[in-house]
Amino acid sequence: MSLPRKKSRTITVGSRVFRWHLILNKDHCANWVIITADDTKNGSELAFTFHPGPIITPRIVRRAILAGFEDGFDPDEPNSSRTLSKERADEILHYYVRELELEGAKFTWRPDPKGGLHMKIRSQTTPKGQLLATASTLEESSLRDDVASSFITAALETGWQPELKDADCFWLEEDLCRVCLAELGFSPPNHAALPTTSRVRESNSRPS
């Protein structure tokens, strides 16, 4: 199907131009994004739904298209229409992989909602090196590069070896996560006074 040009935008993914249309529900229920290839009228559409809050950007639409391809979406096949699952939609909206650089080293990080929202971080130099994960449950508002950088710095100070292959996950302890968040102005919920940064980092230090 084709989308109305006046109420849609285009985006290029690879060598293909797609057209996407945002449908806002006036009753504040689920909203929709509909995507089709711009050069076909009888192909399939890709869609995902989300609740009010996120601002839909071209980057989000690009991630949705790539996720659709992985799930079998073929824009040229009439019977290949797909609606991304809630888990997939959450992934492209909130839990996608980000990249950052810290003191010349490059890392990837992504939020993981399983068992309470936390971060998973790896070195780009050694993607199969030791994984860093936060033991503390995070808030959506703390899913930022500066927070990830603070966690990386604290983990490196307390024994994380991102280049070490076949190693167990390194868990950044909850108290230290809370200190990192507090240093950036976040107020960790449901906790009393925070220990000092130096005390926590000394208590988490590993023997050399």
Image (tube, rainbow, N blue to C red):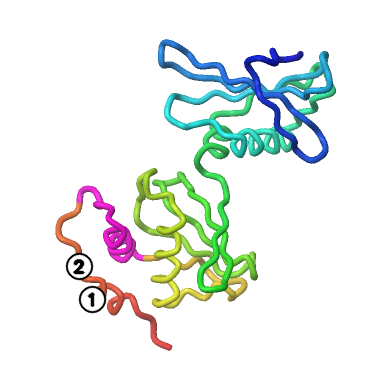
Q: Is residue 22 magenta?
A: no
**Is 192 left or right of 160, judged from the image as shown?**
left
> Is 164 placed above or below 127 here?
below
166 or 79, nearer to the observer? 79
Q: Position of residue 165 (x, y in %)?
A: 62, 73
Q: How crowded is mark 2: few (under 14 residues within 10 Å), some or many (20 or more)?
A: few
Q: Residue at x 56, y 20 (%)?
A: 32
38 or 74, nearer to the observer? 38
Task: Determine whether label 2 and label 1 are within 8 Å by CB.
Answer: yes
> Is 38 placed above or below 130 here?
above
Q: Where is residue 192 in the image (x, y as percent from the top left)?
A: 15, 56
Q: Which residue is drawn at 15% across and 60% down?
A: 193
Looking at numbered disc 1 in the image, what kind of residue is underneath it? Arg
Region of the chain picked out in magenta, as a range: 173-190
Quadrant where the N terminus is found in the figure: top right
Q: What element carries label 2?
A: loop
Which residue was labeled with disc 2? 195
Looking at numbered disc 2 in the image, what kind of residue is underneath it? Pro
Which residue was labeled with disc 1? 199
Q: Does the magenta stretch include residue 184?
A: yes
**Is 108 left or right of 138, judged from the image as shown?**
right
